[in-house]
Image (tube, rainbow, N blue to C red):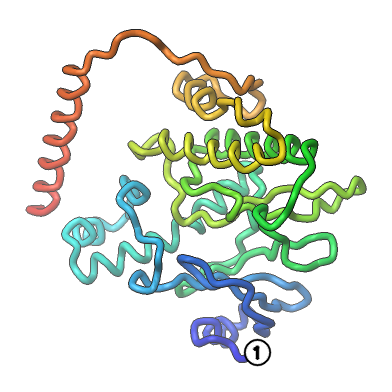
Amino acid sequence: MKAPPRLQTLVEEGLIDTVVRQLMSGKEAMVFVVRCGDETRCAKIYKEANNRSFRQAVDYTENRKVKNSRSARAMAKGSRFGRQEQEAAWQSAEVDALYRLAAAGVRVPQPYNFHDGVLLMELVTDANGDAAPRLNDVAFTEEQALQHHATLIGEVVRMLCAGVVHGDLSEFNILLANSGGDDGVDVPVIIDLPQAVDAAGNNHAQRMLLRDVANLRDFFGQFAPTLLKTDFGPEIWSLYQGGLLSNETPLTGHYERATADVDMQAVLREIDDARAEDAARRLRMATA
């Protein structure tokens, strides 16, 4: 097929040889199957902000750092240059997360290159060499559901130990890939990470992790109802906050919530203090 304009640049640069076909079009990007020498890979073209249905919500972009102070000030002010810089930071977030998680041993597509808003990465395939299906396109036995759920809970823990929360994890952005092993068992691969957040630097990280884990529970619970009674999210976050979480930490799926009375006045004071601090910070950045 004819290469789209943004992929034509990669052809001219020699990064890809040919564009085979379009694989999918999602809320923030279009993905194409491409040939690079003897290998088949995929190229993810990020949509411009005004063409995306998924917006850069403040929950996701909170505390994302840029090295250039001029860019940071422009992003805070919301100028045209600042919006361009924010868009670049949004696009590079997935690249950074992929390299970070791949190094931590998380099952994610291997990234190869990022050029002009296009991410070139591994094409995740099934046993026949075709593009791997998403979880929502597959039916599971109870045993398979329990196995894949346990694997993905382990991946969530591994991500958190690497300091990353996916932020939008569900059956729609997990692929079921060929493991390449003799046992023929497929393995889940986590994709779509531009909304990933820093676990320690984002105030919404806990809520996002709890939602990610709940999504896994609810999906696999359709096939293995016993999972619907589990409570892995709060257990994982509590261990993380206490500095007790590692890739080998045994989990029970149960969590006892504290029953002590909550000092609502103290909570409201904390909220007011946080708002005042944020307003002062924004004022300093605007006048810098």
Q: Residue at x 21, y 71 (%)?
A: 80
Q: Is residue 129 above or below residue 20?
A: above
Q: Residue at x 36, y 38 (%)?
A: 204
For label 1, the crowd category at 10 Å Cα-Cα, with few meaning under 14, some 14 to 19 and many 20 or more, is few
Element type at mark 1: loop
Instruction: Tell me the quadrant of the picture where the N terminus can be found.
Output: bottom right
Relative side of 281 to 113, left or right? left
Q: Residue at x 33, y 36 (%)?
A: 203
Snapshot quadrant of residue 76: bottom left
Relative side of 89 to 23, left or right? left
Snapshot quadrant of residue 141: top right
254 or 70, nearer to the observer:
254
Relative side of 88 to 154, left or right? left
Q: Is residue 281 above or below residue 135?
A: above
Q: Is residue 277 above or below residue 182?
A: above
Residue positioned most to the right? 182
Q: Residue at x 67, y 85 (%)?
A: 18
Relative side of 86 to 5, left or right? left
Total count of labels:
1
Snapshot quadrant of residue 120: bottom right
Q: Is residue 180 above or below residue 34?
A: above
Residue positioned most to the top? 260
- Residue 258 spot, x, y in % from top left: 41, 12
- Type of amino acid at the residue the image marks with label 1: Met
Q: Which residue is mark 1?
A: 1
- Residue 238 spot, x, y in % from top left: 48, 21
- Residue 85 spot, x, y in % from top left: 30, 65
- Residue 201 spot, x, y in % from top left: 36, 38
